[in-house]
Image (cartoon, rainbow, N blue to C red):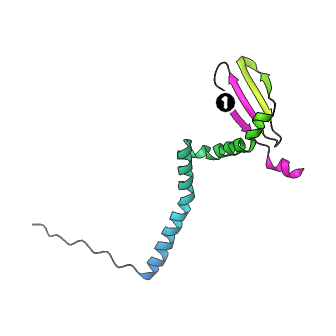
């Protein structure tokens, strides 16, 4: 039978190791919380995390300008290749663009007025 050596027991940790290890571990976990939260939000909305900020901005503009869509008029521009663009300008300075290509369903895109332009007035 081969000479078996018992597994070495781990050395007891010193107080200095504890003071370095646990705060570092806690800081790492707290640093990961915002990224995990963004991943959860993106998953709930069904988008990639890289698109989350754009989706949230579009949602904010929809909420801010919903009554504008019902009250304001719409301008229509016919483009090449059967593209139709409908533009709605809101009092807030935001613009709703609706793209129609042929008989396809429209694509909606809000273009928000930059904040710097509002604060300069």
Q: Nearer the viewer, residue 28 or 110?
A: 110
Residue 22 on the magenta segment: no
Relative horizontal placement of residue 85, taking residue 121 as reference (left or right)? left
Residue under the image location 38 percent in, 78 percent down: 13
Q: Where does residue 56 sit, x and y in percent of width and height?
A: 65, 46
Residue 35, above or below 55: below
Q: Nearer the viewer, residue 2 or 45?
A: 45
Q: Where does residue 119 sit, x and y in percent of width and height?
A: 85, 52
- Number of marks in the rendered image: 1
Q: Which quadrant holds residue 51?
A: top right
Residue at the far bottom: name it: 15
Residue 95 seen in render? no
Quarter of the image that includes the N terminus:
bottom left
Q: Where does residue 46 sit, x and y in percent of width and height?
A: 54, 41
Residue 111, above or below 23: above
Relative horizontal placement of residue 65, taking residue 51 as reference (left or right)? right
Q: Which quadrant holds residue 102?
A: top right
User: Badge 1: how crowded within 10 Å, few (<14), some, or many (20+)?
Assistant: few
Residue 117 on the magenta segment: yes
Relative horizontal placement of residue 24, taking residue 95 as reference (left or right)? left
Q: Which quadrant holds residue 74?
A: top right
Relative horizontal placement of residue 121, taking residue 15 as reference (left or right)? right
Residue under the image location 70 percent in, 44 percent down: 63
Q: Where does residue 92 sit, x and y in percent of width and height?
A: 81, 43
Residue at the far left: name it: 1
Q: Secondary structure at mark 1?
A: strand
Read off the magenta span: 95-121
Residue 76, above or below 65: above
To which residue does mark 1 refer? 107
Residue 8 seen in render? yes
């Amino acid at each position: 039978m081969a000479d078996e050596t018992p597994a070495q027991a781990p050395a007891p940790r010193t107080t200095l190791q504890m003071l370095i290890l646990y705060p570092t571990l806690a800081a790492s976990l707290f640093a990961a919380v915002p990224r995990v939260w963004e991943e959860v939000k993106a998953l709930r909305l069904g988008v990639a995390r890289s698109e989350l900020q754009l989706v949230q901005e579009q949602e904010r503009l929809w909420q801010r300008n919903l009554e504008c869509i019902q009250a304001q008029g719409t301008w229509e521009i016919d483009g090449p290749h059967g593209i139709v663009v409908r533009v709605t300008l809101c009092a807030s300075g935001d613009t709703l663009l609706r793209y129609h290509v042929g008989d396809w369903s429209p694509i909606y895109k809000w273009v928000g007025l930059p904040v710097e332009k509002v604060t300069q007035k």
